[in-house]
Image: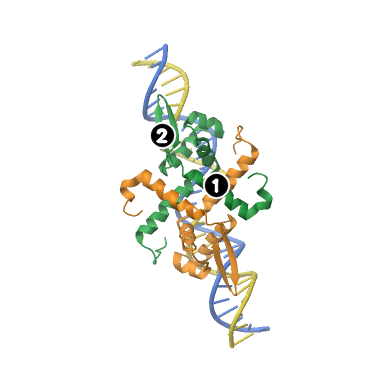
Chain colours: A orange, B green, C yellow, D blue
Amino acid sequence: MAIFAYMKKSNIKLFKLQAKIAKALSHESRLIIINALKDKEMCVCELTKLIGTDQSTVSRHLAVLKNAGILTEDRKGNKVYYKLLTPCVLDFFECAIGVIKAHQLEQIEEIV
Amino acid sequence: MAIFAYMKKSNIKLFKLQAKIAKALSHESRLIIINALKDKEMCVCELTKLIGTDQSTVSRHLAVLKNAGILTEDRKGNKVYYKLLTPCVLDFFECAIGVIKAHQLEQIEEIV
DNA sequence: TTCAAATATGGCTATATTTGCATATATGAA
DNA sequence: TTCATATATGCAAATATAGCCATATTTGAA
């Protein structure tokens, strides 16, 4: 890996952590999950219906988001409810729409 | 791929585009590039020195960011200068620090 | 036109990610 | 305890990504 001679080690570590968070946001299914958790917490079974893939796949997506610090879990009986720990990630959606508009306005304006 | 029965097609397309932008932000080197372009535009050769990997690798990172709508290029002579097209992505850095603080405060507080 | 510098791309390998299936684990109910 | 439901994890296959080397392309200078 690169040495980044011009940067302090602490900054490199910070960029790595930020990259990890961005990576957690970099999958369609995970963005749908985050959007669904905007106002309420939901259990894995509900999110599985929403996403429409295998339950194990959804469980793994949730683990990625939890591991990145974006979600927390809350077990109630035999169900595990996930909720947004850091709602500021929702701001990313706004910025992303801005990027999309700036970049490919013509092909996208009808959906944003 | 999933059908997302509960969602409008337009939303699915939007989430895919947002995921693409997040993916562009999901690599340490690309975050370093964005940070470096915060205040000034820079050519590929300068960014190559900064990152410390092969020039071809940097060129591909820049292509990813450009393709996501985050950077634009500006050729001057035989050099190509890249600059931030959508500075709102810098807000992501702030949110990411918030996520890091909320998630793993103890191991990270000295660097944020 | 010819050469040199800057940048982009083809080809390849190594590694990482996503997914589903099968199964393990955890919890509550009978 | 035994069973059923909910969730997580081991595994393997398919796909995607990152990296480097070699080379193509673009541009300006000689």
Residue nearest the observer in this picture, A90 or A77? A90
What's the residue at 40%, 31% (across, down)? B74
Q: Chain of mark 1?
A: B
Residue A58 in picture, x, y percent from top left: 51, 63
Within 10 Å of disc 2 (Cα), the crowding (few <14, some 14-19, many 20+) is some
Residue A96 in picture, x, y percent from top left: 43, 49
As drawn, the label of residue A2 is: none
As drawn, the label of residue B73 is: 2
Cα gap from disc 1 to disc 2, whole angstroms: 25 Å
- In the picture of the structure, the residue carrying the numbered disc 1 is B94
Within 10 Å of disc 1 (Cα), the crowding (few <14, some 14-19, many 20+) is few
Marks 1 and 2 close (CB-CB < 8 Å): no
Q: Determine whether the residue tagged by mark 1 lies in a helix, strand or loop.
A: helix
Q: Chain of mark 2?
A: B
**Residue B103 placement, left or right of A56:** right
What's the residue at 35%, 45% (across, down)? A104
Tell me if residue A108 comes above or below residue A74 in the rendering.
Answer: above
Residue nearest the observer in this picture, C30 or B6? B6
Label 1 or label 2, whichever lies nearer to me, is: 1
Identify residue type, mark 1: Glu
